[in-house]
Image (cartoon, helix red, strand yellow):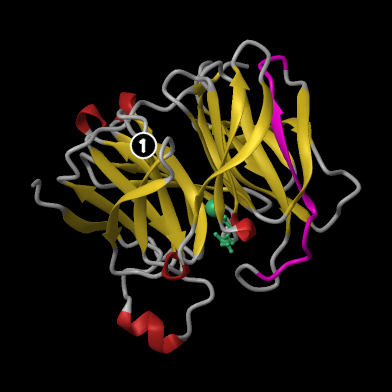
Amino acid sequence: MSSIKIECVLRENCRCGESPVWEGASNSLLFVDIPAKKVCLWDSLSKRVQRVAVDAPVSSVALRQLGGYVATIGTKFCALNWENQSVSVLATVDKEKTNNRFNDGKVDPAGRYFAGTMAEETAPAVLERHQGSLYSLFPDHSVKKYFDQVDISNGLDWSLDHKIFYYIDSLSYSVDAFDYDLQTGQISNRRIVYKMEKDEQIPDGMCIDAEGKLWVACYNGGRVIRLDPETGKRLQTVKLPVDKTTSCCFGGKDYSEMYVTCARDGMDAERLLKQPDAGGIFKITGLGVKGIAPYSYAG
Ligand SMILES: O=C(O)[C@H](O)[C@@H](O)[C@H](O)[C@H](O)CO
Ligand SMILES: [Zn+2]
């Protein structure tokens, strides 16, 4: 057995930390704090953080082949120039839904930026139902809409052979799979691969490991779980010292470390006293499995 170590590497006090992405070229972790409207870049060597403020909730961030990053800000797919901190809009969705915003997003193996929307919450997981949709931004900046009726669009990733797209609508309490056509970006044949158990609470962000197994952050469950999408079985549970674990990614040397984001919003003063690292960035080592490098947006 490997010995698992969990460490809060950055006490960022995020209201809702999300979208951790490892940037190998800079040995850094990118992430967002959605309601705080900021994108952060934590240098794992110097331990320093750079922060860029934007003008609306920023729900995901990803690498861009041209340099800089892309991010979902409000209901816009945007390019983010890190050097001069400027944002340019690539496309806008849900124009008629004024209370909507983007939520989780990730780039597919062909360089398309997938992200879904949701109604803005009045409290964690309290919102008008069925307002969200799933979209992708193609490299030519055109937008494809896949489906609507989503509650909280979350965790997404692709199988190692790129033939399956994994997706979470949080309030369905399940992890779903679709057949994926990498050439066209089409999805089909939705099915459930895992149903959350009660104490696992709300499924949130997700990533795949180098063995094709899924890691799901459990919001209010204070853990990440490892799932076998082929058998539908949970293989492992790793508990963290914070309840509101929101997302996870692999990073570090050879992608052998896992980074986990979490939230403070929705915790009362007493809970916050017991969980002083809530809103921080956690590093898990000793998992004995590696991840894969993130894909970069191709437009
Ligand atoms: O980051 C997200 O996915 C949502 O924006 C968050 O608000 C919470 O994770 C959600 O409330 C949990 O269901
Ligand atoms: Zn999320």
Based on the picture, tell me whether residue 199 belongs to the magenta stretch. no
Q: Position of residue 284 (x, y in %)?
A: 23, 50
Residue sitting at x 31%, y 32%:
291
Is most of the magenta stretch helix, strand or loop?
A: loop
Q: Quadrant of the C terminus?
A: top right
Which of the 4 quarters of the picture holds residue 145?
top right
| Ligand 2 has an atom within 8 Å of the beta carbon of the residue at disc 1 | no
Q: Position of residue 111 (x, y in %)?
A: 56, 19
Which of the 4 quarters of the picture holds residue 11?
bottom left
Q: Residue furthest top?
A: 183
Camera-nearest residue between 89 and 155: 155
Left or right placement of residue 55 versus residue 156 in this view: right
Q: Position of residue 276 (x, y in %)?
A: 32, 75
Question: Residues in magenta?
Answer: 126-140
User: Where is 166 relative to 272, above or below?
Assistant: above
Residue 87 visible in the current orientation = no
Camera-nearest residue between 290 and 53: 290
Give the residue type that dot 1 points to.
Lys
User: Where is 79 relative to 150, above or below?
Assistant: above
Based on the picture, tell me whether residue 128 belongs to the magenta stretch. yes
Judging by the rendered image, the residue that carries numbered circle 1 is 213
Q: Residue furthest bottom?
A: 270
